[in-house]
Amino acid sequence: MRSHFPILILMSSVVALGGCDVFSPDTYWRSDDYKLTAIDIKGQMMLAVDLHNGGSIGIVGPTVFSLGADGRYIVVKQHPTKGEFGKFDRGITNYFVVTRLPGSDEDKEKGVRGPMSKDEFDHLSASMHLPQFTKTFADLE
């Protein structure tokens, strides 16, 4: 009688991998080592550095609702979170500029500038020739 054990192992592996970052159902944008991801709900949207081991480290916290990118910079608009999980303050918009840096995740964290106001961002944008915002989530805006 033939054993079904190898088939059961294969099926279990497929089911187990379905919940892992391998399929990234919560990743909404990716460029090199950077990704826009949400944990559980879109109200937790953050810009993160992919650690390439199934994990990531957040560098601009929730709630990110708009971004743009070129080869040198990533620009981010964010509403700060309120006390409750998934709640954020739409009345406040923070701006961030992320300089793409080589190296480890700690090195990449050093490339984050912000939070800043719209006026500060606009002034910086004029002098640094930053990219335009090209991806916006209207339901988070």
Image (cartoon, rainbow, N blue to C red):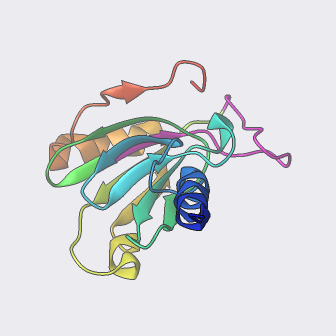
Inspect the magenta stretch and tell me whether residue 42 lies in it.
Answer: no
Task: Relative to 62, say whether 106 is above or below.
Answer: below
23 or 59, nearer to the observer: 23
Inspect the magenta stretch and tell me whether residue 81 lies in it.
Answer: yes
28 or 124, nearer to the observer: 28
Task: Relative to 59, say whether 85 is above or below.
Answer: above
Question: What residue occupies the far right of the structure in this picture?
Answer: 84
Question: Residue 76, how many percent across, how many down?
Answer: 41, 43
Question: Residue 56, how many percent across, how many down?
Answer: 49, 66
Residue at left 37%, top 74%? 110
* Relative horizontal placement of residue 27, taking residue 69 as reference (left or right): right
- Magenta span main SS: loop
Question: Residue 27, how many percent across, how many down?
Answer: 46, 44
Residue at left 36%, top 28%? 135
The image quarter in which residue 109 lies: bottom left
Residue stretch in magenta: 75-91
Question: Residue 73, how many percent across, how many down?
Answer: 23, 52
- Tag count: 0
Screen quadrant of the C terminus:
top right
The image quarter in which residue 119 lies: top left
Screen quadrant of the N terminus:
bottom right
* Relative horizontal placement of residue 56, taking residue 31 as reference (left or right): right
Residue at left 69%, top 44%? 40
* Relative horizontal placement of residue 138, taking residue 86 as reference (left or right): left
